[in-house]
Image (cartoon, helix red, strand yellow):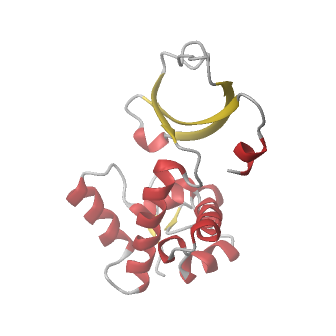
Amino acid sequence: MQVAQAQKGSWTIVWLLFFFMLINFVDKAVIGLAAVPIMKEVGLTPKEFGLVNSSFFFLFSISAIVTGFIVNRLLVPYLLDAIRALEEGVGSVVDIDNSMKLGCGYPMGPFALLDFVGLDTTYYISQIMFDEFKEKRFAAPPLLKRMVLAGWNGKKSGRGFYDYSDSANPKAMSL
């Protein structure tokens, strides 16, 4: 939002959130974010931006200029609620992940997704969103903060809600 407010004249900021997914490899999704200043009068297609590549599937989400975009406004509370459910003893890491995969048809459960995205990244995003909106749903649960402070950032650090010491067979952590 601060970037948009700093712009003067006929420029506007269009936030483009790209989901790049190698075909048939949803769990290998790479999420990128690009902020592109363009003139109001110019309508450019993804191809004109040079974003078309036959090996990737593109989904565009253009939203209003607000903190969090569409995906984070919906996804972050979902992930944080999964951590709260674990803290409250609703189920184990595996129980909650399997429930969301089987019950909702998601390709991965919230804890596998948290480990993939990075616990530190999720914590950072939640802090920004909580500071902006002051809503409890964006407040990071104590368990997330403790894990980040301990360096358990998920797949990239080898440990998060799952232990990745055997990357072919991750094991749920006892938390």
Q: Position of residue 97 (x, y in %)?
A: 34, 64
Name which residue lies at 50% across and 69% down: 161
Viewer-proximal residue among 139 and 85:
139
Name which residue lies at 37% across and 32% down: 24
Q: Residue furthest left?
A: 103
Q: Quadrant of residue 132?
A: bottom right
Q: Position of residue 144 (x, y in %)?
A: 57, 75
Q: Position of residue 110 (x, y in %)?
A: 41, 62
| Image side of residue 75 versus residue 6, left or right | left
Residue 166 in view of the camera: no
Q: How many discs mark residues in the rendered view?
A: 0
Q: Residue furthest top?
A: 48
The vertical placement of 160 against 40, above or below, is: below
Q: Residue furthest front?
A: 9
Name which residue lies at 50% across and 77% down: 136
Residue 20 in view of the camera: yes
Name which residue lies at 47% across and 70% down: 80
Q: Position of residue 84 (x, y in %)?
A: 43, 79
| Image side of residue 165 versus residue 95, left or right | right
| Image side of residue 162 versus residue 120, left or right | left
| Image side of residue 134 versus residue 87, left or right | right
Viewer-proximal residue among 153 and 88:
88
The vertical placement of 158 against 70, above or below, is: below
The vertical placement of 88 against 124, above or below, is: below
Viewer-proximal residue among 173 and 12:
12
